[in-house]
Image (cartoon, rainbow, N blue to C red):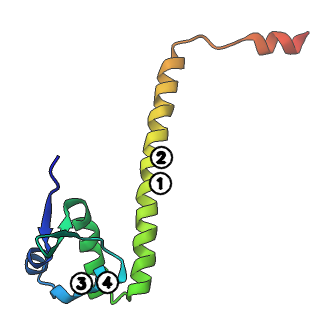
Amino acid sequence: MSIKYVTIQEFSSFHQVDIHLIETFIHFGLLEPLDMDNQYCIREEDIEPLEAMVRLHTELDVNLPDLETIMHMRQRLLQLQARVEELEGQLRWYENRFAARPAFSGWEEAESQ
């Protein structure tokens, strides 16, 4: 499996963002780049979160510590959403499996005795 990535130069050029902003995110620990041939690269899965960070920082003037908190909460929210989807899938499986079975009537008989 090959890792897909873009250089920070390509990212900053495409998004018209100063490359120093991306480097600041890296030095602050908000982004963990790949080091490919002595240049920083961004993994494909990190592009969307980086775009969100750039928007929050440039358009809403969110400072770095607050940006770190927001991105942590965002990651946690994504994890929780994935877990909910997993649990919903399990619930649907049980619902489908037991929907065809007749209801257990033993409780009514036990209560009347």
**Is there CB contact under 8 Å for labels 3 and 4?**
yes
Q: What residue type is labelled 3?
A: Glu
Q: Earlier in the sequence, mark 4 or mark 2?
A: 4
Q: Which of 70 and 99 is in front in this view?
A: 70
Q: Which amino acid does label 4 sit on?
A: His
Q: What residue type is labelled 2?
A: Val
Q: What residue type is labelled 1?
A: Leu
Q: Nearer the viewer, residue 93 or 13?
A: 13
Q: Which of marks 3 and 1 is nearer the N terminus?
A: 3
Q: Distance between the residues labelled 1 and 4?
A: 28 Å
Location of the C terminus (image quadrant): top right
Task: Quickly name the residue at label 3.
Answer: 23
> Quick one: SS at disc 2?
helix
Instruction: Name the front one of labels 3 and 1.
Output: 3
**Is there CB contact under 8 Å for labels 3 and 1?**
no
Task: Quickly name the residue at label 2.
Answer: 84
**Is there CB contact under 8 Å for labels 2 and 1?**
yes
Q: In which quarter of the image is residue 47?
A: bottom left
> Quick one: SS at disc 4?
helix
In the picture as drawn, the residue positioned furthest to the right comes out as: 113
Q: Which of marks 1 and 4 is nearer the N terminus?
A: 4
Q: Distance between the residues labelled 4 and 2?
A: 34 Å
Measured along the vertical axis of the image, is residue 104 above or below residue 61?
Answer: above
Left or right of 36 on screen, residue 78: right
Q: Which residue is drawn at 39% across and 72% down?
A: 71
**Is there CB contact under 8 Å for labels 1 and 4?**
no
Task: Quickly name the residue at label 4.
Answer: 27
Task: Quickly name the residue at label 1.
Answer: 80
